[in-house]
Amino acid sequence: MYKLEEIMTASPVIPVIVIDDIDDAVPIANALVMGGLRVLEITLRTECALEAISLIKRMVPGAIVGAGTIITPEDLLNAVEVGSDFLVSPGSTTELIDAALAQNVPLLPGVSTPSEAMVLLARGMTHLKFFPAQAAGGIPMLKSIAGPLPQIKFCPTGGISEKNASDFLALPNVLCVGGTWMLDKTIIAAKDWSSIECKARAAVKL
């Protein structure tokens, strides 16, 4: 089982992927991994998301495949059942954290305030998602949190782009960022997998 530190330091960007067509799952994942982005977050926002995770796990060597938009313990169990290497949630509830700890599965829970971060720190969780990053205060907020809570490491997601990603990555309490800019819908619709690979290669250099 991967540890969150290992997952968050495998590459500077975790692509946040919405799979609308199951036939696109493996080609998208292959393009991202070939470009150097091994850690992939498949969001549970579409009916084929769980199937996509299972397919990518089997068909894309080297991929570290996570399930995003984990909201309930049922989501968590379903994601674990199809072989997810890690889980990502937009926020946290007591029930969700209890389920993650019971399953001993790497969960990156979302927070947007120091109080939320402290609650999770009290449960032994030091690797968190900062969401929605830009709307919740962005870089100034992360700098402020770093002072009293230097032991917490973040993956900011939400409003992160190719233009501002490197500014977030420069912060000492940021290990990686989550983003979608390498997954333009028009590129996916055109099945232009080489462009996704090219964008992934650029993201690795941030």
Image (cartoon, rainbow, N blue to C red):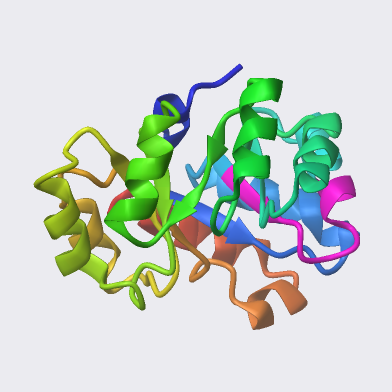
Residue in view at x 38 percent, y 69 percent: 160
Note whether 3 is above or below 45 in the view shown: above
Q: Percent position (x, y) of residue 98?
A: 64, 32
Q: Between residue 87 and residue 175, name the one nearer to us.
A: 87
Q: Percent position (x, y) of residue 70?
A: 69, 51
- Left or right, 93 with reference to 4: right
Q: Indicate whether residue 44 is drawn in magenta.
A: yes
**Quarter location, residue 61:** top right
**Residues drawn in magenta:** 40-52
- Left or right, 48 with reference to 198: right
Residue in view at x 43 percent, y 51 percent: 129
Residue in view at x 66 percent, y 79 percent: 185
Note whether 107 is above or below 188 in the view shown: above
The answer to whether residue 45 shows anywhere in this view is yes
Q: Between residue 139 and residue 187, name the one nearer to us.
A: 139
**Quarter location, residue 90:** bottom right
- Left or right, 176 with reference to 193: left
